[in-house]
Image (cartoon, rainbow, N blue to C red):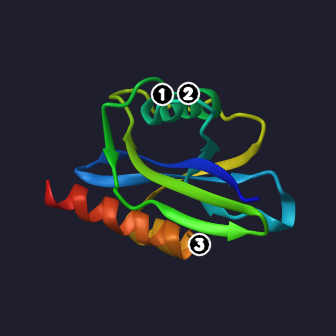
């Protein structure tokens, strides 16, 4: 029997000097740790937006977004008897709210513009998601 696990991946961003800047986080998993977006599981009965807001609030200490963008690119992967479905979103930090309070599961964070953020992402699906977000932001 397959168990379905839903997760959100949240690409937190802000504009500095009219260029988008992206927040990358790295977990405390030591040698297996890598830079990526904020991610967390969606609880049973959670609405998507509620899960995103809770995740960003608990993991980073940030309040509601100035803008929330559905990247409309869910990703599916299978690991044994688990199917993981990841929902990708952009979350713009509210003005003057860039002070972070990282949860203990995160070792570090880094704000980076697209040219620096893209190569730091190790997963192809994360790279595809940040390209889509960057394209949306650049077009507006």
Q: Helix, strand, or loop for circle 2? A: helix
Q: Residue at x 46, y 36 (%)?
A: 48
Select label 1 or label 3 by which is in front. 1
Q: Say whether marks 2 and 1 touch (CB < 8 Å).
A: yes
The CA distance from mark 1 to mark 3 is 25 Å
Quadrant for the N terminus, please: bottom right
Label 2: few (<14), some or many (≥20) within 10 Å?
Answer: some
Q: Position of residue 12 (x, y in %)?
A: 45, 45
Q: Is residue 107 left or right of residue 92?
A: right
Q: Position of residue 92 (x, y in %)?
A: 35, 40
39 or 112: nearer the viewer: 39
Label 3: few (<14), some or many (≥20) within 10 Å?
Answer: few
Residue at the far right in the pictured view: 30
Q: Helix, strand, or loop for circle 3? A: loop
Q: Is residue 91 left or right of residue 3?
A: left
Label 1: few (<14), some or many (≥20) within 10 Å?
Answer: few
**Position above or below: 120 against 97:** below
Q: Residue at x 48, y 27 (%)?
A: 50
The CA distance from mark 2 to mark 1 is 6 Å
The CA distance from mark 2 to mark 3 is 24 Å
Q: Which mark is residue 123?
A: 3
Select label 2 or label 1 by which is in front. 1
139 or 108: nearer the viewer: 139
Looking at the image, tell me whether mark 2 or mark 3 is earlier in sequence order. Answer: 2
Please give the residue where the numbered disc 2 appears in the rendered image: 54
Q: Is residue 39 left or right of residue 133?
A: right
Residue at the far left in the pictured view: 140
Q: Position of residue 135 (x, y in %)?
A: 25, 65
Q: Helix, strand, or loop for circle 1? A: helix
Quadrant of res 77: bottom right
Q: Residue at x 71, y 34 (%)?
A: 103
Q: Which mark is residue 50?
A: 1
């Amino acid at each position: 029997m397959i168990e379905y696990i839903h997760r959100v991946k949240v690409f937190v961003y802000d504009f500095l000097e009219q260029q988008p800047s992206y927040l990358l986080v790295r977990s405390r998993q030591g040698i297996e740790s890598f830079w990526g977006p904020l991610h967390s599981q969606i609880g049973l009965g959670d609405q998507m937006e509620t899960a995103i807001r809770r995740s960003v609030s608990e993991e980073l200490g940030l309040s509601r977004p100035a803008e929330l963008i559905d990247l409309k690119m869910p990703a599916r992967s299978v690991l044994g008897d688990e199917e993981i479905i990841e929902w990708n979103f952009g979350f713009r930090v509210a003005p003057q709210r860039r002070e972070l309070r990282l949860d203990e599961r995160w070792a570090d964070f880094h704000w980076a513009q697209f040219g620096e953020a893209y190569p730091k992402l190790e997963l192809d699906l994360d790279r595809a998601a940040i390209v889509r977000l960057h394209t949306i932001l650049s077009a507006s």
